[in-house]
Image (spheres, coloured by chain):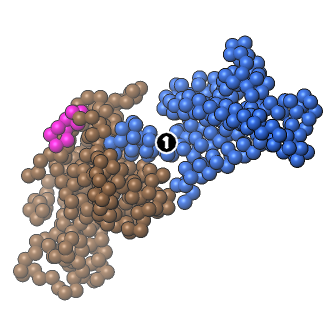
Amino acid sequence: MNGLALQFKGVSKLYPGAADPAVRDVSLAVEEGSFVTLLGTSGSGKTTLLKMVNRIIEPTSGSITLFGRDIRERPATELRRGIGYVIQQTGLFPHMTVEQNISTVPDILGWDKSRVSARVSELMELVRLPEDMRKRYPRQLSGGQQQRVGIARAMAGDPKVLLMDEPFGALDAITRSSLQDELLAIQRRLGRTVLFVTHDVSEAFKLGDRVVVMNGGVIEQAGTPLELLTRPATDFVRQLTGGDDLFQLLELLKAEDRMLPLSAESMLPESAPSVQRTDSLKSALEQMLRHGASEAAVVNEQGEAVGRLTLDRLQPQPREGGADVGVFAETL
Amino acid sequence: MVAEAYRYITENRERFWEAVQTHVTISLYALLIAAAICIPLGVLCAKYSRLTAPVMGLFNSLRVIPSLAVLVILLPILGTGFTPALAALTLLACPPILINTYLGFRKVEPSVREAASAMGMGAGRLLRRVELPLAAPLMISGLKTAAVEVVASATLAAFIGGGGLGTFIINGLGLYNFPMLLVGALPVAALAVLMELVLSGLERYASKFQRI
């Protein structure tokens, strides 16, 4: 069991002059190493909640602890150097090169030149920016490249927690999807805690180990994507996840959510396509249809088979209560 | 006529150089004092919107008063000579520096500022590393406007005994001596062009990141 990275206790925020609080009495625990997405429409309070973590916004009441320490214990500047921050508009410094942008926090922390330079190379490789972009200015880069710089800059000081406010919101669908995949891979590899705000349901479900659905300043439901789909706590959550829309469900569920364990007697035929365990059931179905197969192998990041999927497993399962939930709860 | 002016200069070399020196000194002092007052004031106006209207209004209304009138108004208070001329030129230099500093700081994207403080930059570092460099092109452009105006207007200093190249112009006009007038006018024009060139170069350097 991991420790807690973040804990919100009865946090509220009332903006001066506003009739209703933007965030109302929110309590939430975020485990270390988890990827939590905050999902909601604009005005749901998700961004306010995020920005209270690095004290860009101060809560009206309640407390927030970061690894057990109240965030108000330290000066805001010191706290922020240990928390990565990525926003939709990137907020890159237009007068600084890619290299200078990425080394912002190391510079503040006073690292020596060679260490900063090595760190920049390491990060550019991590976010897959070619080394020859080091001396470019942000406006010479595409939107996707700019956000890669944004992510690299946020991770430069090796923060344990990353806050991301709709970082991929302004990107085209293809770029967004590949950045999502890379972010997931980076997070899996480095084990950082990520708090990620989005209004895009499929993004929230694709990225989050846990999805926190917010509406009107309160949490409607917090749980794994599977829990939200199979046991929506409120009508709002049910509506958000698409109700009985089968295609929506297939898109939101991952291969690993429905896969069967591998066993000796259930050898997969050679012709079976393979899908990543984090791929959606929709893309698994697509693969099966394309290959005319009724089964697919589920593989992990290293390409090793970890389970199998059959067409039967893609059938809609009873949403609430039913025996089926128990079945795949076991396989999780 | 230009040849005659040149002869006048060679014959009165000492007087000429003294006038150039006074002219340049009074212009630079006026610019430095105006920058020292108006850059911080412009930054404050950009940060606290309550200050904007009164401060901008004050300096803009001062600008409407012709420089010569300012000189005359200051005459009973500061007397004649270098000081009242410097005060009038400083007032003249203020509006473009103030307004462009304000605009330069207002132009910094809120998201850039937010990202900078979210990275853990304190106010001082934010100012030095982010806001100033981003506002610099506009600020230098304001300084350039002020410099050209001040160098040209410094000729008026001669009216109240402040010295400078204006002395030749006034004497030339009074004596219908056009070569003498040119002895004042040509170097003033050259100085103004020089200021323009130097500051334009600086402006180009500071705005490199916007043009690549």
Q: Which chain is blue?
A: B
Residue holding disc 1: B132
Can residue A302 be seen by looking at this rendering? yes
Residue B70 in which image quadrant: top right
Residue A202 drawn at (x, y percent): 32, 58
Can residue A215 be seen by looking at this rendering? no
Q: How many labels, in total?
A: 1
Left or right, residue A110 beside residue B209: left
Q: Residue at x 36, y 41 (%)?
A: B121
- Compared with residue B189, is residue A326 higher up or lower down, i.e. above or below? below
Residue B85 drawn at (x, y percent): 70, 25
The quadrant of the picture occupied by the N terminus of chain B is top right
Q: Secondary structure at mark 1?
A: helix
**Which of the pair A328/A19 is nearer the observer?**
A19
- Compared with residue A312, is residue B57 higher up or lower down, i.e. above or below? above
What is the span of residues highlighted in magenta in the rendered image?
Answer: A65-73
Left or right, residue B107 beside residue B9: left
Residue B107 drawn at (x, y percent): 53, 42
Q: Residue at x 42, y 49 (%)?
A: A91
Q: Is residue B172 magenta?
A: no
Residue A235 drawn at (x, y percent): 28, 46
Left or right, residue A135 beside residue A108: right
- Compared with residue B39, is residue A202 higher up or lower down, i.e. above or below? below
Q: Residue at x 29, y 42 (%)?
A: A80
Q: Which chain is brown?
A: A
**Which of the pair A77/A224 is nearer the observer?**
A77
**Which of the pair B208/B117 is nearer the observer?**
B208
Q: Chain of mark 1?
A: B
